[in-house]
Image: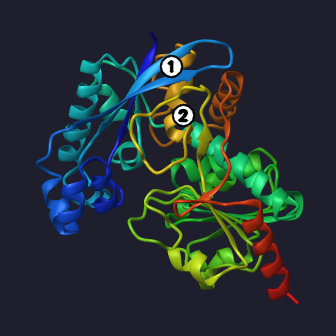
Amino acid sequence: MDNFAFVIHPIDPKRDVERKFPLLGRLLPVSLIHFLSRFFPPLYISHIVGVRSVLGPEIEGWFVACPFTPERMVTLPEEVVYRKVVRTGRLAQKLGAKILGLGAFTSVVGDAGITIASRLDIPVTTGNSYTVAVAAQAVREAARRMEIDLRRATVAVVGATGAVGSVSGQLLANECGRMILIGRRTARLEEVKAKIEARRGAPTYLAQDVSAIREADVVVAVTSSLETIIEPQHLRPGAVVLDVARPRDVSRRVVEERDDVLVIEGGMVKVPGETLDFGFDFGFPPRMAFACMAEVMILALERRYESYTLGRDLTVEQVEEIEALGAKHGFELGGFRCFEHAVTDEDIERVKRAAHASTR
């Protein structure tokens, strides 16, 4: 049977460790989890069964875990992180995986998968191409439901110098009225702007301060920050905020204090297969997965055992291709979530009413 493996790692240390090791998660302080993560070996997490294309083929897979937390990945020497992720990939190889997906910080550390792929005997993909595709789908649907006309709207991308942010900006600039690119590296922002202009996208403006999103109707947040960077005062009433980042870019205070703003998490995908079982609770409803997880499943269903998305130079063409392949096999946008809770129609209506009241 065709198959895959996907690398996960603890994002919220206590909560995520507790999912697999309840006692350790409850007893160990966060500081000790960070410290011990350097010495823990890669872990087998679960066997994934029942991923079935609407065209008929079925695949299986495995979750394997790299024990490093995001804090350790950005503070330890790069080579130390590479070795741990590669060891996790070799565990996947021993299980029989034919392709490996990198999740969360394992997909952005160092050169975004290139070195890791070079040290393994199976292809590797970061999932970033399908992450962008699903993020764009979520933006369109959320804007529609909030009665925002994208063709006239201002869209801001926070983290526009990264791989996901850059191509998200290029893709959405062809659908919106105005684009704001926000990032720390001015030269890189200029490169992204030039690509948008080459595609005859919307008028595009550059900023380094996150406060620029106050002008935006739609915000796509895709940084690799360890801390939240979007706070309640940054957003205009009625704004849609799509938080693709893990750890989150959006502070919990936004949903607690701003009932006139719609915050949703990017990348939740409904995976085809009535008997699908991930064998592990990573916080999503049944049959739902992150888009980066879905990308490696799509490639396995296609029998395209290749390193599809690596490095920091994604293209719109890559995104459009993987989106089409996902639709072919029955993958689709899986609704909205926000801080571990489903976003319902009633929630959206409440945000709309609060936004109208705020602007009177």
Instruction: Name the residue at 41% across, 48% down.
Output: 104
Vertical order, 274 against 104 (above or below): above
Q: Nearer the viewer, residue 275 or 343?
A: 275
User: Residue at image x 33%, y 32%?
Assistant: 46
Q: Amino acid at mark 2?
A: Ala
Of labels 2 and 1, earlier in sequence is 2
Q: Residues within 10 Å of mark 2 (few under 14, many from 20)?
A: many
Residue at image point 51% right, 74% down: 251
> Distance of mark 2 from mark 1, alpha carbons?
10 Å
Q: Nearer the viewer, residue 163 or 146?
A: 146
Q: Are marks 2 and 1 in contact (CB under 8 Å)?
A: no
Residue 195 visible in the shown view: no
Numbered disc 1: secondary structure: helix
Query: Quadrant of residue 129 in the image?
Result: top right
Q: Residue 181, labelled with which disc?
A: none
Q: Is residue 240 left or right of residue 163?
A: right
Q: To which residue does mark 2 refer?
A: 294
Quadrant location of residue 87? top left
What crowding class fits label 1: few (fewer than 14 Cα within 10 Å), some (14-19), or many (20 or more)? many
207 versus 190 height, above or below: below
Residue drawn at (67%, 56%), measured in percent from left and top?
Answer: 193
The residue that disc 1 covers is: 300
Q: Residue furthest bottom?
A: 360
Q: In the rendered structure, which amino acid carries the disc numbered 1?
A: Ala
Mark 2 lies on a secondary structure that is helix
Q: Is residue 175 above or below residue 97?
A: below
**Residue 98 appears at what percent x and percent y?**
39, 17
Q: Is residue 153 left or right of residue 20?
A: right
Q: Nearer the viewer, residue 24 or 102?
A: 24
On the image, the x and y values in percent for residue 208 come to 56, 72
- Quarter of the rendering occupied by the N terminus: top left
Q: Quadrant of the C terminus?
A: bottom right
